[in-house]
């Protein structure tokens, strides 16, 4: 057992730390994400405000002026339209869908072909074995 105490544990035992966490401070920091619609709406509202209104808007939304500047640049470059698209792979066109279907069918048929070849090989070996047994038994019958 370790006798070393952390600063946190020592402070709690000495009664120096408050046991109730501050509700205004999140336990774990997390990155905020903003939709293109939210950015567009905040930019429109920000640009319509006077100086005091802009500060109030930023405080209310918990934003910084650097975000507003970055969003303006995105808007001016046309990136907002690109951000509005859903994330992930684009829907496949008819040719791509057909290719995917044919690949799956090709894999299935290759598997069936492998099974068929194995069956033919076993049948060939069985036929050879039966021929060998038949010739051996006919020799044994003729010897009797």
Image (cartoon, rainbow, N blue to C red):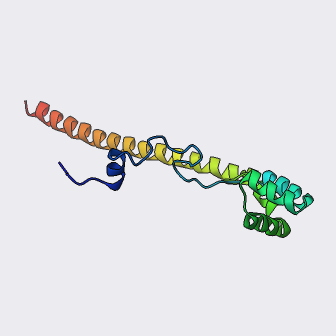
- In this rendering, position of residue 128 left or right of residue 111: left
Q: Quadrant of residue 124?
A: top left
Front position in the image: 128 or 42 = 42
The quadrant of the picture occupied by the C terminus is: top left
The answer to whether residue 93 of the structure is visible from this angle is no
Q: Residue at x 86, y 57 (%)?
A: 53
Tally of numbered discs: 0
Q: Position of residue 5 (x, y in %)?
A: 27, 53
Left/right placement of residue 132 relative to residue 117 reads left
Q: Is residue 77 visible?
A: yes
Q: Is residue 96 left or right of residue 18?
A: right
Residue drawn at the location 88% of the way across and 57% of the way down: 44
Residue 39 position, x and y percent, is 79, 56
Check the image and name the residue furthest to the front: 15
Q: Nearer the viewer, residue 48 or 95?
A: 48
State whether residue 112 is above or below residue 34: above
Q: Nearer the viewer, residue 114 or 81?
A: 81
- Report the residue that reaches farthest toward the left: 144
* Observer-nearest of 110 and 56: 56
Q: Position of residue 84 (x, y in %)?
A: 78, 54
Residue 120 locus on image (x, y percent): 39, 43
Residue at the image position 48 percent from the left and 42 percent from the top:
112
Residue at x 52% of width, y 48% of height: 107
**Residue 127, image quadrant:** top left
């Amino acid at each position: 057992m370790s006798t070393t105490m952390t600063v946190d544990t020592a402070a709690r035992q000495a009664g120096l730390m408050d046991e109730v966490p501050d509700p205004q401070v999140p336990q774990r920091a997390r990155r905020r994400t903003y939709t293109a619609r939210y950015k567009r709406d905040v930019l429109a509202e920000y640009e319509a405000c006077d100086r005091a209104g802009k500060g109030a808007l930023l405080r209310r939304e918990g934003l910084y002026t650097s975000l507003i500047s970055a969003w303006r640049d995105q808007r001016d470059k046309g990136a907002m339209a690109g951000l509005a698209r859903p994330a992930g792979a684009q829907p496949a066109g008819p040719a791509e869908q057909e290719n995917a279907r044919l690949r799956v069918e090709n894999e299935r048929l290759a598997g069936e072909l492998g099974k068929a070849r194995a069956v033919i090989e076993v049948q060939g070996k069985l036929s050879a074995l039966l021929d060998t047994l038949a010739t051996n038994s006919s020799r044994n019958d003729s010897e009797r």
